[in-house]
Image: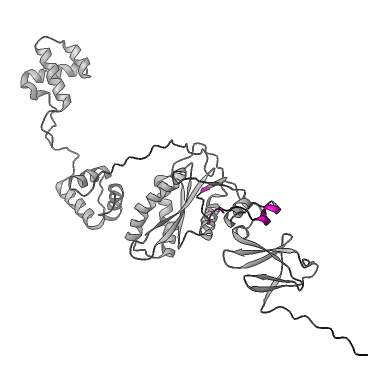
Amino acid sequence: MRTAMSGRDIRRVQMMGLVAEGKRGLGTAAEVLGVSYRQAKRIYRRYREEGPAGVVHRNVGRRSHRSHSKELRATVVGKYREEYRDFGPTLAAEKMGERDGLAIDHETLRRWLIADGLWQVKRRRRQYRSRRERKHRFGELVQFDGSHHEWFEQRADGCCLMNMVDDATGTTLSFLAEAETTVAAMRVLWAWIERYGIPQAVYCDRKNAFVLDREPTIAEQLQGVIPKSPFERACEKLGIEVIVARSPQAKGRVERNHGVYQDRFVKELRLESISEIAKANEYLRSTYLEELNRKFAKPPIDEQDAHVPLLDGQSLDAIFCFEEQRVVSEDYVVQFERRLYQIQRERRRRLPAPGTSVTVQKWLDGSLHFLHSNRELLVEEILQRPVKKEVHALSA
């Protein structure tokens, strides 16, 4: 509670003293103090009647009509100590309102916590970096990355949050995976495309799960082939440009968004008593992502959506897959992952000639598909190669 004079009050006392001594006019005093002439007259009248104490505002030292009761403050701080000790004031105020029916402004809660030594203002000096302006349209650039964290705290093993954030709006989509793998990268982009459409570009780290970071082999150089990861090849089929970030700060949008998840999502999982990846992903889809985007996403500068739909006939199963080339043997057998597959004869369709290459696709569901000239071949797994029949010459 303030009882001493503020700097404003001291200036008013000094100026009213000059007016009383005849060294300043009341109009001049009003201009210096930044008040109207009528207000200056009221201040001067109180100064002459009560002395310097008369210039102090009448509400100083009184309890505000908008202040909260001591009982409410004790209840809120006690609830914070018991259930929300590691929550920030903003999130704690939200949860107290939703779960406990305690309507309190986050700044009020922050002041109470600081006064009781439960919260400390964190100030950090950061290296200066020039700000890159947001893209103008939704889907023009989507940043994505994996965040390794103790998402279930000590209730389960650690896992990785695969997270995508739109550069123009901050819209986020994510799911938990056991590790930051190529499959996880494909699945999060697949989910984004199903919900919003195909973005123009993705911004990611130089990780082998996303892009290949090696020189081409001699065979690749002779064929003029640039080595690409399965994720890059999938993006190429969809017409998505893959942009590689040179530093974490370059994709700061998704890095900062990781911090939001690590602060809020961990606590949400604790409050919901969730300790399994499948249940956490269901909670993300059904509740958390919609709430997070409603709270933090913003409208784009340009309302035109930069996403494009899938073309007719495009299958995400055949796009998000692992592809390899295999050569057809003389007996029309293809070997893949130490297994043998016999190409079956089909009516009105010619078989690929021995010595030619076929494409083997391994889809994310584990199924295999053999392709030649953009058509799928009918194959059957066999346990061993067919035995060649020996031809014996007839004796004379």
Residue 249 lies left or right of residue 21; in this view the side is right
**Stretch of the chain drawn in magenta:** 203-222
**Going by the picture, which residue comes out furthest to the right?**
396
Q: Is residue 116 visible?
A: yes
Whole-percent x, y for residue 168 in the image: 49, 41
At 66% from the left edge and 55% from the top edge, which residue is drawn?
A: 218
Left or right: 130 as drawn, with respect to 72: right
- Relative image position of residue 48 (x, y in whole percent): 7, 17
Task: Give the image quarter of residue 376.
Answer: bottom right
Q: Which picture quadrant has residue 84? A: bottom left
* Residue at 43% over, 51% down: 290
Task: Judge by depth and name the residue closer to the eye, 141 or 286.
Answer: 141
Q: Which residue is depicted at the point 74% across and 72% down?
A: 344
- Decide: is 75 above or below 47: below
Front one among 176 and 104: 176
Q: Position of residue 396 (x, y in %)?
A: 93, 90
